[in-house]
Every structure is written in C-alpha cells, then in structure tokens.
Amino acid sequence: MDRILEIAWKQQEKPFHAETIVPADLIPVSTLRQILISIVEHCKLYYPSDYCALYKFDDWHEHDGHVTDQHLTTFQDLHSGLESDESLYQSRHQDCSVYHAFYPDSLDFLCRYNILDENEEAEQYPGIWGDFSFTGYGCDLWEITKRLRDYSNMTFSQQNSKEYFDKIYGG
C-alpha cells in the first residue's frame, strides 16, 4: 500500500469500507489480460482524467507490508502494459506477492494485479498465471461483477474489504 491507502485500510475508510472481488484461483495470463482491459475500460469511462487524478504503485501489502509511494499515471499508461500477454508478463514485479495497483484520488476503487513467473507453479499451473483484486462499492462493484459474468468457467467471490486486506497482510 501507499501511505494514503494504508491509513484508509486501517480505519476501514474508502475504498476499504465495502467489498473486494477476488478470483477463487489463479488465472491464465491471456484471460487475466482481458479482465484487466475490461476493468481499465470501466474505470476510464467513469473516472476520466479531467475528473480525477489516477495513481499507481507497487503494492507490497501481501509480501511484507512495506509502504511505498504512489505515482501519477494515466489510463493510456495502464493500457500500454496490457497490449499483449507478453507486455503484461514483462510488467510483473520480480518479487513474489507484489502487486501492481492503481486507484483514483477519489479513493472510489483500488485495482491490484499480480503476475507469477513463468512455470512458477508448473505442476498445477504450467505457463504464465496471475490474479487480481478489485476493491470498491456501489456501481463500480456491480459493473465489474457484471463484466466478470463473461468468464462463466471461473469463480469469483466478494469479500468484506477490510477483512480481506487484514487476512492477506504480510507485515
């Protein structure tokens, strides 16, 4: 987390006051890329750059809880990492359980994703796999849930955000 989100998480404030969507299992990189494109498109539509600032950061919350700094970004920048399965794979962090994350300055949502090294868990997951979480409320949660219905072969759950982030904390 960054400093802003760490405070919000500990105080169960926006975006941690509602729900987090998570997959039940790891996702093949090509499917994960399509899911992330859909999420970014939703966010771009409802959080245009003339409405709010967009931040990105490396999220160490699950790895060791290290708090990092956020940096301004754009939806164009996010899209560039999603141009191909290879570009998404190359964007991965070199440490395990370190997610890439982005959120608007309104704190209405937090989207995180992680890409494992190729064949990191080859017995069960040959190739390239990853996962994501989307934390938010209201229309954003409803819209992301609706978009995930296209992946009927996968299971997603909604969990209380504060409890979820408490549970995965690596610090």
Image: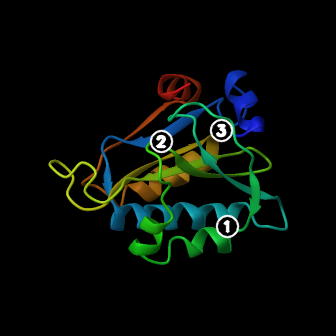
Q: Are marks 2 and 3 in contact (CB under 8 Å)?
A: no
Q: CA distance from mark 2 to mark 3?
A: 17 Å
Residue picked out by circle 3:
1
Residue picked out by circle 1:
45
Instruction: From the image, state whether disc 1 or disc 3 is nearer to you.
Output: 3
Residue at x-position 46% and y-position 51%: 114
Residue 113 in the image, given as x and y percentages of width and height:
49, 52
Q: Residues within 10 Å of mark 1 (few under 14, many from 20)?
A: few
Residue picked out by circle 2:
21
Q: Residues within 10 Å of mark 3 (few under 14, many from 20)?
A: many
Secondary element type, mark 2: strand
Residue at x-position 47% and y-position 47%: 95
Instruction: From the image, state whether disc 2 or disc 3 is nearer to you.
Output: 3
Residue nearest the observer in this picture, 56 or 108: 56
Tell me the quarter of the image containing the C terminus: top right
Amino acid type, label 2: Ile
